[in-house]
Image (tube, rainbow, N blue to C red):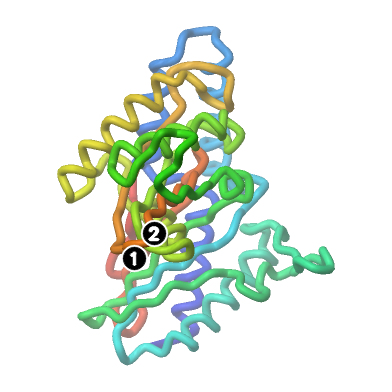
């Protein structure tokens, strides 16, 4: 592996993720805009979102002032050292911050002091798995703090919602979470949901759902059906863009499931704002680009 070339590719991955919204997300935003009434606050909000996307792309500027937590999902050949990869990625993040592709928005928790390179304890975040071939598959999500604050987790049964340990109980939890958000996470947004797991793995797997294309469906028919129902019922709440009311509360609902212990039944819900920043790249063993993921 040529580590210098890898750093260059990672820097470009960060640039694209920060400044250029993926085509599948923009298409859904435009489709949702057409559902809003002319001259309404909802239509105005959607117009501003689309203009923001255009300007960010034109000027190669960050889509949002909060460039978010960087979440790297890496499938590496067995002969690629994850520690070396992480070192290269941290250098790329430092360079991206210096160039203004990322804002300096990482702080030390206890002191409040800025981590001027956006590199510090626990950040950026890396998820590694061994691949079965010689290619590197690297995906990046940038998740802003406002959308992260909108996430929630439920432990079933939940008496307040009359939610039992079944998919109807899951449905009640997801809709309750959406009502609580009320547009505060920069709606319209995407819900990533994990049914099962433990408290930690459930939230991580819920975020992993954002790696899916917006127009796809779960491979499990029972979850695909629930995704469609939740999307329909979520829109019917008419919370609307930025909470102004309207038809566009959601851009998508993505469900996944993990095994659990008999004593626990968690429903973990992660929220992603309209700026669903995620990109990916597949690299050959010596660093050449095989393809970009989430293209237009």
Q: Is disc 1 surrounded by few (<14), some (14 to 19) or many (20+) residues within 10 Å?
A: few
Q: Nearer the viewer, residue 158 or 203?
A: 158
Pinpoint residue 273: horizontal percent, then vertical percent.
52, 40
What residue do we see at 80% from left, 68% from top?
110
Q: Nearer the viewer, residue 66 or 239?
A: 239
Q: For mark 2, give the secondary structure.
A: loop
What residue do we see at 52% from left, 43% from top?
57
Decide: is 18 above or below 230: below
| Residue on which the image places disc 2 | 264
Q: Nearer the viewer, residue 7 or 152?
A: 152
| Residue on which the image places disc 1 | 261
Decide: is 136 above or below 223: below
C-beta proximity under 8 Å, tags 2 and 1: yes
Is residue 24 shown left or right of residue 62? left
Q: Is residue 50 visible?
A: no
What residue do we see at 45% from left, 47% from top?
269
What residue do we see at 44% from left, 24% from top?
248
Pinpoint residue 178: horizontal percent, then vertical percent.
49, 33
| Image quarter in which the C terminus is found | top left
Pinpoint residue 144: horizontal percent, then vertical percent.
59, 50
Decide: is 212 above or below 31: below
Q: Nearer the viewer, residue 210 or 164?
A: 164
């Amino acid at each position: 592996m040529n580590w210098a070339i890898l750093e260059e590719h990672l820097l470009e991955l960060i640039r694209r993720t920060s400044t250029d919204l993926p085509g599948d997300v923009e298409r859904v935003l435009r489709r949702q805009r057409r559902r809003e009434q002319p001259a309404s606050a909802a239509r105005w909000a959607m117009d501003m979102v689309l203009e923001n996307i255009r300007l960010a792309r034109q000027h190669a500027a960050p889509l949002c002032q909060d460039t978010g937590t960087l979440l790297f999902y890496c499938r590496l050949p067995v002969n690629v050292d994850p520690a070396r990869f992480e070192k290269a990625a941290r250098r790329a993040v430092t360079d991206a911050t210096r160039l203004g592709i990322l804002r300096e928005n990482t702080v030390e928790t206890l002191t409040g002091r800025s981590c001027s390179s956006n590199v510090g304890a626990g950040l950026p975040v890396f998820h590694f798995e061994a691949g079965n071939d010689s290619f590197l598959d690297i995906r990046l999500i940038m998740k802003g703090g406002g959308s992260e604050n909108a996430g929630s987790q439920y432990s079933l049964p939940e008496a307040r919602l009359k939610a039992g340990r079944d998919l109807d109980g899951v449905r009640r939890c997801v809709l309750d979470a959406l009502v609580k958000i009320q547009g505060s996470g920069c709606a319209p947004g995407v819900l990533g949901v994990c049914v099962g797991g433990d408290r930690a793995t459930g939230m991580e797997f819920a975020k992993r759902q954002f790696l899916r294309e917006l127009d796809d469906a779960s491979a499990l028919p029972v979850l695909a059906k629930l995704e469609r129902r939740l999307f329909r019922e979520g829109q019917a709440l008419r919370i609307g863009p930025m909470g102004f009311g309207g038809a566009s509360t959601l851009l998508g609902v993505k469900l996944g499931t993990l095994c659990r212990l008999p004593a626990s039944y968690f429903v973990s819900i992660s929220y992603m704002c309209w700026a669903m920043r995620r990109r990916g790249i597949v690299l050959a063993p010596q660093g050449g680009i095989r393809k970009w993921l989430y293209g237009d």
